[in-house]
C-alpha cells in the first residue's frame, strides 16, 4: 500500500526527500564546525505537548524581533524563508485526544453517560486532533523574542519553513485506527510569551497521505491565532481571543471534505497570573472522508467542539 501511495504522489514524495536531504546536508556541514545555539525546546499543553531539538545549520545569528509588531514579524519571516538556516526535530503528543480514546475503549459506561441525545461531551472536548502523536522534521528560518529584563519563557521563537511529519495511528470519533501516514507542510508558526503576554500563531498549507486505504488523502489550508494579554481589556475579542480555521480537500479529485471553525475567549486573572479559556465551534466532515467500514450508524456531519483550558 505504501508503494501505491508513493507512486500516486511522486511530486510530494520528491519534495519530502529533497527537504530531508537538504536538512541532513546542512547538519553535516554544521558538524564540520558545530555552530553555537543548539537547544532543546518544549511546550506543555492539554491538547498539544512537544519536545524538540533545535539545530542551527549555519553560523548566522538568530534575529531578535521581540519589540516588533505582529505584522512586522510575519513580514520578516516570509522575506527570509530561503535558504534554510535552522532545523528542528520534534516529538509531539496530544494528551486530551488520547484520553478520549482511552475513555471510549476502557471506560465505555462513563463515556456513554456523557452522551446527550447525539451530543457526546467527551467527543466534543477532544475533537479536532486526528493523531495521538507525531515525529516532525522542520527546516527553514527562525526568529527569537527576548524582552529586556525578563527571563525567556518556553521557546519564544517564530518559524517559517517546511515540515515533514510521520505517525502510525489515526483517531476517528475517539477510536484509534492503524494508519502509517506522511504529512508535508509549508508553515509560518510562532510562540511569543512574556510575563504579561502570550501570543501564538500558525498559518499552514499542506498535504497528508495515508497508508490505510480507508482514509482519504487530503490537501488543506489552516489558520490559527491565539493572543492572551494580561494588560489588555478582559472582554476584548482582539486582545484576548483565539481563532482556528482549517479546510480539507481530496487529493484524488479536489472535492471539499471538511471544515473546522473554532473561536475562543480568554479571561485573564491578573492576580493569579493565569487565564481561563473556552473554545467553541464545530467540525464538518464529508462522509467520503472515510471508507464505509469506518463509518458508524450514528455518524453525523457536524461535531460540536468545546475545549475548556487553563493557560499560565
Image (cartoon, rainbow, N blue to C red):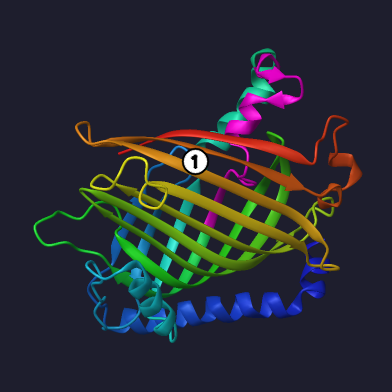
Total marks drawn? 1
What residue is shown at x 26% (from left), y 83% (from top)?
Answer: 59
Residue denoted by label 1: 47
Instruction: Determine if residue 101 is in view.
Output: no
**Nearest the camera: 116 or 291?**
116
Residue 213 belongs to magenta span: no
Image spot of residue 33 (x, y percent):
26, 82
In the figure, 75 relative to 99: above or below? below
Which picture quadrant has residue 157? bottom left
Q: For residue 126, what is the image quadrant?
A: top right
- Name the residue furthest right: 292
Q: SS for tag 1?
A: loop
195 or 184, nearer to the observer: 195
Task: State the image coordinates of residue 9 (x, y, percent, origin top left).
Answer: 77, 74
In the image as oriented, which residue stretches furthest toward the left? 149
**Residue 122: image location, x then y, percent:** 62, 26
Query: Image quarter for residue 54?
Result: bottom left
Question: What is the x, y in percent for residue 57?
Answer: 35, 79
Choose between 155 and 227: the one closer to the eye.
227
Residue in view at x 81 percent, y 51 percent: 289
The answer to whether residue 218 of the structure is visible from this angle is yes
How many C-alpha atoms fall within 10 Å of the one at disc 1: few (<14), some, or many (≥20)?
some
- Please tell me which residue is depicted at 57% across the width and 46% down the height of the picture: 262
Point 37% across, 41% down: residue = 235
Q: Is residue 245 left or right of residue 176?
A: left
Tell me the magenta residue range.
Answer: 111-135
Q: Is residue 270 above or below residue 224?
A: above
Amino acid at each position: 500500500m505504501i508503494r501505491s501511495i508513493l507512486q500516486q504522489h511522486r511530486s510530494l514524495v520528491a519534495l519530502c526527500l529533497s527537504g530531508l536531504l537538504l536538512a541532513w546536508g546542512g547538519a553535516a556541514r554544521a558538524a564540520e564546525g558545530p555552530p553555537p545555539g543548539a537547544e532543546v525546546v518544549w511546550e506543555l499543553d492539554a491538547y498539544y505537548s512537544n519536545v524538540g531539538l533545535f539545530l542551527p545549520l549555519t553560523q548566522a545569528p538568530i534575529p531578535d524581533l521581540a519589540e516588533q509588531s505582529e505584522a512586522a514579524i510575519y513580514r520578516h519571516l516570509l522575506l527570509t524563508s530561503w535558504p534554510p538556516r535552522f532545523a528542528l526535530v520534534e516529538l509531539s503528543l496530544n494528551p486530551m485526544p488520547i484520553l478520549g480514546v482511552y475513555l471510549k475503549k476502557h471506560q465505555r459506561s462513563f463515556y456513554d453517560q456523557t452522551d446527550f441525545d447525539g451530543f457526546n461531551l467527551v467527543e466534543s472536548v477532544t475533537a479536532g486532533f486526528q493523531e495521538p502523536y507525531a515525529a516532525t522534521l522542520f527546516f527553514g528560518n527562525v526568529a527569537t523574542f527576548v524582552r529586556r529584563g525578563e527571563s525567556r519563557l518556553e521557546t519564544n521563537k517564530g518559524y517559517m519553513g517546511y515540515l515533514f511529519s510521520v505517525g502510525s495511528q489515526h483517531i476517528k470519533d475517539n477510536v484509534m485506527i492503524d494508519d502509517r501516514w506522511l504529512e508535508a507542510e509549508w508553515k509560518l508558526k510562532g510562540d511569543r510569551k512574556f510575563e504579561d503576554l502570550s501570543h501564538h500563531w500558525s498559518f499552514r498549507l499542506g498535504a497528508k497521505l495515508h497508508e490505510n486505504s480507508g482514509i482519504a488523502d487530503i490537501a488543506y489550508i489552516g489558520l490559527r491565532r491565539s493572543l492572551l494579554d494580561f494588560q489588555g481589556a478582559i472582554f476584548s475579542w482582539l486582545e484576548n481571543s483565539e481563532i482556528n480555521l482549517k479546510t480539507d480537500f481530496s487529493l484524488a479529485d479536489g472535492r471539499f471534505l471538511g471544515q473546522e471553525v473554532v473561536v475562543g475567549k480568554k479571561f485573564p486573572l491578573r492576580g493569579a497570573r493565569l487565564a481561563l479559556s473556552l473554545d467553541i465551534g464545530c467540525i464538518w466532515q464529508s462522509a467520503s472522508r472515510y471508507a464505509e467500514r469506518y463509518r458508524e450508524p450514528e455518524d453525523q456531519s457536524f461535531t460540536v467542539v468545546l475545549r475548556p483550558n487553563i493557560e499560565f
